[in-house]
Structure formats: structure tokens, C-alpha cells
Image (cartoon, rainbow, N blue to C red):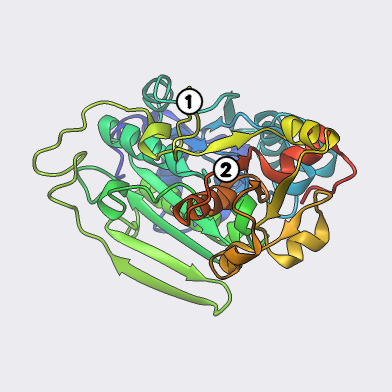
Amino acid sequence: MSYLSRIEKVYAGSPLSHDEIRRYGRHLIMPEVTASGQKKLKSARVLVVGAGGLGSPLLLYLAAAGVGTIGIVDFDVVEESNLHRQVLHKTSNVGKRKVESAKEAIAEVNPHVAVVTYDMALRSGNALELLRDYDVVVDGTDNFPTRYLVNDACALLGKPNVYGSIFRFEGQASVFWRGHGPCYRCLFPQPPEPGTVPSCAEGGVLGVLPGVIGVIQAIETVKLIVGIGEPLIGRLLVFDALRMRFAELRLRPDPKCPLCGEAPTLRELVDYEEFCGLRTSATGPSDGGEEMSVVELKEAMERGEDFLLIDVREPHEYELARIPGSQLIPLGELPARLHELDAAKLVVVHCKTGGRSARACRLLREAGFRRVKNLAGGIEAWSQTIDPSVPRY
């Protein structure tokens, strides 16, 4: 029996063509799969949220396996900096919408797969409608607001959420399914403070790592559909690429979980940017600090204003690209080097995109600096808007 009752009911009506029998022959001769399992795959509808690093192996292998309908949610375009890890996309597709690039790649892998694209961001206002018609949802996102959104929407709809995340040399995977095991909130009841956990754009990621975690997610999705093996429900698989080790953590449902606990209080989707402390109000950023745009910084430079421009990235990043006139003080060294800064001057802090510099701004304010501004978008925004000669990485 499949784990998914809808597929169990409809797969008998989806016969395999001669072409499909030839294509999936190595599946069909496996006693755990056979033709009945392949028909379940053909009848399945899987939604992949994110066509980036994790989405690349996911989409390719789900298509190759014969999942009949694959939905793809992504609002981004292919950039050159994506290509070292997002193997779904090609150099010729730089500048193209990711969902269209993904659809083209899937068509080359398996023309029997129907692809439905959603060129939009997943939001509280559209998530339930988008997820409702799919049997399995696979989370290939890279930010906390969307992870909580996917988790909550899946739980409210009773859908399995095949989770994966990556950072630098480490990856994680699990399956969250309300009624069968814990949800993402049971593992992480509260999101981290803004800026305390760098994104892959800030901290980097080994290019081949998404291939490992994305393939694990694809395996779990196929297992759920066909109804074989032991899914990662109630287990968190942790992969350390540097040491080439896998570890497994047992997870239990949290009886106090507001979503799937004994007395749930969360019965509808919320504002996940606000929940994660990332919502910017009319008076400034959510952390209470002020921001300066790169245009404002350029204008201040041209007027010859006297201020400090502090770069809190790492030395190897500073070697790649820098804003003229900036002083490098890596974030980890900042507490011990506060004496180098003139507290009477305006201090403008930047990093790559704004996460680390937000932490630095909080640190400076707590140390008594009153005139502190975070450069919105960091050196990435400077390169895009002000000076394209500054390399992007």
C-alpha cells in the first residue's frame, strides 16, 4: 500500500505505455516497485518549492523516476553565481526565469512528465491554494520564513513535507507529516534571531552538497509515493561533507507545539516575515536600527561627508571585492576592535547582503555607539546599482 491514499485509489487507471515500460524497466523488475509502484509514480502530483540548489537534483530525479505531475514554485531568475550548485540550469539560461529553465530541463529528461510552473513567491495568501492539489510537497527553500510557511501549510492540509537544508559543508533532511510524526516547529519552535544564522549567500555552500541532500529528498519522495521502506518521519538525517559522515537524530512530536501539539492554537497561516523578525516597519528595520541605501552612501561620499564605512566580511571576501574607502573589521573581530572606531562619527556598516552587518549594528549600539546605519543590500547592492566594476560573488 502507498502511504498516500489518493494515489492508491487512482493509480490503477494510469496504464503504462510501451515507451514507459522501456524507460522504467529497471524499476519494474524490482519486487518493491513493479508496475503497480510505477503507476503510483505516474499518478502522483509533487510540488517542489524552489528551483535552486536543492531543487535541481530533486526535479531532475523526480522527473527521471516518472512522477506524473511536478509543480515548481520559484520567483527568481537564473544568475551566473547559481551555476556552481544549481545543475538544473545552464549558462545559456542566465537571465531566464528559473521555472522556465527548469521546465525545459525536465522536458529533456522525461517528456512523459507534466510540469506546472508558478512564477511567484510562496506567500501566506497563496500557499494553501497552491499546495492543496498536490500529494507531496518538497521544501527546497533557503530561508526561514518560507520553511515555516511550507511546514504550516502542509500541516494544515495534512500533506507530507519533505524537508532539506544546506549550509557550507553540512546538510539536513527529514520528513514532517502531521498525524504521522513531528513537524518542523517541533524541531525549531522559534526561528533564530535575524542575522544570527547566515544564509548561503552570506556564508557560502559547497557546490556539490545540494546534490547529496536533494537526492535524499527525491528518494524520500519516491518512497512515500510507492509506499516502500522507512521514511525519515521522526528522524533528522545530518550529513557532514568534510568528514563524510551521516548522523541520525530521533525526533518526537512536541506536545506543546502550537501547530500539531495536544492543544494547537495555530489554525491559519501567519505573516512569516514578521514571525521571523524580518518585517521592516515604516519607521525602520525590525531590529530597531537605521538603514542607508547604496544611493545615499554614494551621495554622502560625493559630498565629502565625514563618516566611517566598516566592512564586516572576511578577509578572503575583501580580496574579491570592496567598496572604496571601506575599513575591514571582520564581524568576529569587531568586539575586540571597537576602540579603533570614533563613536562621535556616523558609522555605516556593510557585509555582502546585509545579514552580518545587521548583527554588527546591534553590537555597536549595545556598546554605546549612537550613530550607526546598516548599508541595505551590502556590497551586492553596491555592485548592482552603483559600480558594476565591483565583482559579484
> Badge 1 is on which residue?
283
Q: Residue furthest left?
A: 263
* Image position of 390 (left or right of 218): right
Q: Residue at left 43%, top 20%? A: 126
Tell me if mark 2 has few (under 14), some (14-19) or many (20+) residues whose alpha carbon lies within 10 angstroms of its own: some
Q: Residue furthest right?
A: 389
Tell me if mark 1 has few (under 14), some (14-19) or many (20+) residues whose alpha carbon lies within 10 angstroms of its own: few
On the question of residue 95 being in view, the answer is no
| Local secondary structure at mark 2 | loop
Residue 69 on image: x %, y %: 51, 31
On the question of residue 385 being in view, the answer is yes
Q: Amino acid at mark 2?
A: Arg
Q: Amino acid at mark 1?
A: Thr
Residue 198 on image: x %, y %: 54, 54
Pick the front one: 50 or 185: 185
Q: Residue at left 64%, top 50%? A: 201
> Badge 2 is on which residue?
371
